Image (spheres, rainbow, N blue to C red):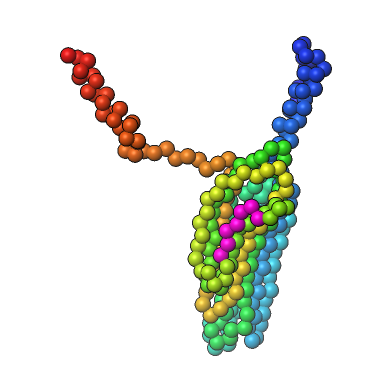
Amino acid sequence: MRWRRLSDGGGVAFLLVCLAATSWCSAGIVVTARESSLAASGQTSADQFELSDTSTEFGFYDQTIGQSLPGAGGGTTSASASQRSNVTSTALPTEARGTAAAQVAELDAIAAQASTSLDISFDVIGQPETLTIQGHVQGTFDGAARVTLENGSGTVFERRIEIGDEGQIDFSESLTLEPGSYTIFAETHVTGTQSPNSAEFEFAISQGPPALIPLPPPLLGGAAMLLLAAWPLRRLVGRR
């Protein structure tokens, strides 16, 4: 900040400028913590595995874990999880995606499961902020996925697919958040059966409301079309 003497208003004006600058600089969104986690496990009558990965560092996270085991009598037991997200201390993710998949061998069906999760804590400081969150959650019959935004008072936004629902939910929501502390939870969980199962979350967050898409000329309102149609007629009448 450049300091200079104000000729009018003296020290009072000087103080007001400094306070306004401080308020402006301190307003906005500050990300205070992130945690990305992956887990995958499976078991047959002869072997088993249990994998995991976790990161609490800010920055880009792009990891995949997984393994397959042959089942007695044929088939495989497998589980995998992956996540791709970029979370910094000054910005919520413009892209975040997590997937999980699991299956057990038909003749050696003991256990398989997988999950991925992303938790982001952030503060809205100084003034309300408008955010747009877009994406989807999806899952097969034995898969679950959700994207949830919470504050100290409860749930602000949530979209979820429960085990047994099977399907996909798309979302695009504009939210105005008052100053305070918030947490985003995004997660998937899959239980392996003899049929392949999977679940996925994907979302992006941007500041401000969704962009308005202008209508093409053929979809202009009736009054505008009448004005456009009348313009050649006015020119002809003016030439008489």
Q: Residue at (72%, 37%) from the top-left corner? A: 126
Foreground residue among 193 and 48: 193
**How many badges with numbers are in the image?**
0
Foreground residue among 98 and 206: 206
User: Vertically, is 17 above or below 39?
Assistant: above
Q: Quadrant of the N terminus?
A: top right
Where on the picture, by quarter, is residue 100? bottom right
Foreground residue among 221 and 84: 221
Give the left or right position of residue 144, taking residue 127 as reference.
left
Where on the picture, by quarter, is residue 39? bottom right
Main SS of residues in magenta: strand
Q: Position of residue 97 (x, y in %)?
A: 58, 57
Q: Residue at (65%, 61%) from the top-left corner? A: 117
Q: Residue at (50%, 62%) from the top-left corner? A: 168
Which residue is farthest top? 7
Which residue is farthest right? 11
Q: Residue at (74%, 28%) from the top-left corner? A: 21
Residue 156 in magenta?
yes
* Magenta stretch bounds: 155-161
Q: Quadrant of the C terminus?
A: top left
Q: Position of residue 7 (x, y in %)?
A: 77, 11
Q: Position of residue 122 (x, y in %)?
A: 71, 48
